[in-house]
Image (cartoon, grey):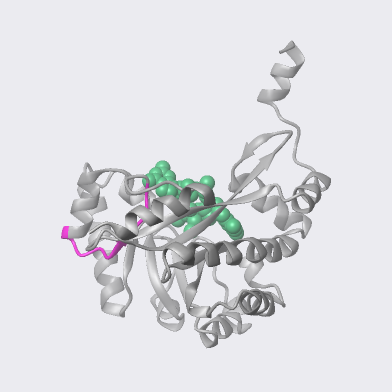
Amino acid sequence: MSFFEKILRHHPKPITEKELQDALKHGEFVFYYQPEWDLKTNKTRGVEALVRWESPKRGYVPPMEFIPLLEKTGLIHEFTTYLFNHTVPDLVKVHTVAPDLFLAVNLSICQLQEKDLISTIQKELQANNLDSKYLECELTESQELTDEILSNGVLDKLAELNIPVSIDDFGTGYSSFERLKRLNIRKLKIDLSFIRTLMEDEKNKSIVSSIIKLGHDLGFPVLAEGVETTEQQEWLRDNGCDYAQGYWFSRGLPMDQLLPFLQENMNKK
Ligand code: C2E
Ligand code: CA
Ligand code: CA
């Protein structure tokens, strides 16, 4: 590698709109699926789609580096269609080995404001003959859910379609109790920053216990993200947490690894 190549590697050129357009056109965005498991039964309940850009030029690019650019360039609209076009047929394949699992997709506030979001979802579900009960949408708590978004009806339409919303990264952002009450929420997902130092930090234990209690008092289950150790897993189960995700159970897996993983997990006694 030449001196200049080395420099370029450490200071990659900014991603351009054209590159993102090409990535959409050539199918370079791929979805990995991270299982969510039930802490009581240790069985998978569903999978969350996590996008990665496998760029021939840049290699692996994590979502946080290109989702904001897709939003800035307006290409996010095309990406939303791409997301459902790819993940819903994947769920049909998942159902061949694990019939009842759901698919969770991450939607940014920008995506939630797209006028045809609901029709895009409906079209894809119909084309795959899939009931809407198998879909979940994750909204990040740190993105302000403004009154405008709450009143533009999209959350109500998701509710009408029976598609529940989970609050992602819970504990890091701004959620008034009033809003929590108004949303048709499936579950709260406790942000992984609280789980990372759970065993060493008494304050994090208090926060996590309080979120579990809050969720249960409001009538919805609670999931812990980023569970990496047996100790964390046991503590969460003993403290009433319902579900979990994290490397302890599984990383996000490409389809060819997900199917054998599910087959083995679903058949376990
Ligand atoms: P997120 O939805 O909170 O996803 C969880 C992130 O934590 C994922 O990173 C996942 O790989 C990582 N993770 C899971 N388990 C563990 C663990 O045990 N330990 C640690 N250290 N990390 C763990 P990823 O895939 O880089 O995604 C980052 C964020 O990008 C996601 O956060 C989500 O907000 C966003 N994102 C991903 N896919 C999409 C998408 O299709 N659309 C939109 N709008 N955003 C997406
Ligand atoms: Ca998520
Ligand atoms: Ca999260």
Q: Is residue 244 magenta?
A: yes
Q: Position of residue 97 (x, y in %)?
A: 43, 62
* SS majority, magenta: loop
Q: How many marks?
A: 0
> Which residue is nearer to you in this view: 12 or 228?
228
The structure residue drawn at horizontal position 40% and vertical position 81%, both measured from the top left corner, is: 181
Ligand 3 sits in quadrant: bottom left
Residue sitting farthest toward the bottom: 160
Please name the residue shown 38% across and 48% down the image. 250
Compared to 238, does 122 lie above or below?
below
Give left or right: position of 77 versus 184: right
Q: Quadrant of the N terminus?
A: top right
- Residue 128 falls left or right of residue 167: right
Where is residue 246? Give x, y as percent. Answer: 37, 49
* 219 left or right, relative to 117: left
In x, y percent, where is residue 263?
39, 56
Q: Residue furthest left?
A: 238
Q: Does residue 139 appear anywhere in the picture?
A: no
Q: Nearer the viewer, residue 178 or 99?
A: 99
Give percent across and percent down for residue 159: 51, 84
Which residue: 67% across, 65% down?
A: 85
219 in the magenta segment: no
Name the foreground residue: 268 vs 135: 268
Which residue is depicted at the point 70% across and 34% down? 58
Establish if 60 lies above or below 152. above
The magenta region covers 238-246
> Left or right: 265 with respect to 82?
left
- In the rendered image, is residue 170 in sight? yes
| The quarter of the displayed image where residue 269 is located | bottom left
